Amino acid sequence: MAGLALKLIIGLGNPGEQYARTRHNAGWWFLDALLARAHGSWRHERQLKADLARARVAQSDLWLAKPTAFMNRSGGPAAAIAQFYRIAPQEMLFVHDDIDLPQVPHDSSKAAAMAGTTACAT
């Protein structure tokens, strides 16, 4: 990973007023706070199904993205953004409310019992 820098932060959340104050929007809240500190603003990109912004954070120019799909469907918009801006997976950071769990082989009986966000695996 030497030579790669962070280029994109994707905050996961769920659309709709009924989810606005739930923990599932932690990724969106984080990006809103980050963008406010950078004095930036969001613009909706309908084709990418996301709200996007540019922000200068710690001497780095970053893309910030809030997919407007439900968090378990955010993989498609995340992949579209990465492809459009030619950003490698190693240059992306996902912000979400679930705890990152160790990866378990798919044939493991534990795999079925593990829950979590599947958006990053899409």
Image (cartoon, rainbow, N blue to C red):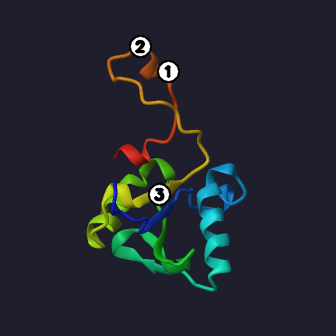
Describe residue 97's horizontal placement relative to residue 49 as left or right.
right
Q: Position of residue 82 (x, y in %)?
A: 32, 65
Give the numbered dot on residue 113: 1
Q: Is residue 108 above or below residue 39?
A: above
**Disc 3 on helix, strand or loop?**
strand
Tell me if label 3 and label 1 are in contact, CB under 8 Å: no
Q: Nearer the viewer, residue 71 or 35?
A: 35
Q: Residues within 10 Å of mark 2 (few under 14, many from 20)?
A: few
Sequence-first tag of 2 and 3 = 3
Going from N to C along the chain, the mark reached first, 3 or 1, is 3
As drawn, the residue found furthest toward the front would be: 2
Query: Circle 3 is placed at which residue position?
Result: 93
* Residue occupied by mark 2: 109
Q: Dot 2: what SS?
A: helix
Residue 52: percent from the left, percent from the top? 47, 75
Q: CA distance from mark 2 to mark 3?
A: 29 Å
Tell me the residue at 66%/62% (across/down): 17
Q: Separation of disc 1 and disc 2 at Cα?
A: 7 Å
Q: Three-letter amino acid code at disc 3?
A: Leu
Q: Is there a contact, CB below 8 Å, between mark 1 and mark 2?
A: yes
Q: Is residue 5 above or below residue 76?
A: below
Count of marks, rendered view:
3
Residue visible at 52% across and 31% down in the picture: 115
Q: Is residue 87 above or below residue 104?
A: below
Q: Nearer the viewer, mark 2 or mark 3?
A: 3
Give the CA separation, mark 3 to mark 1.
Answer: 26 Å
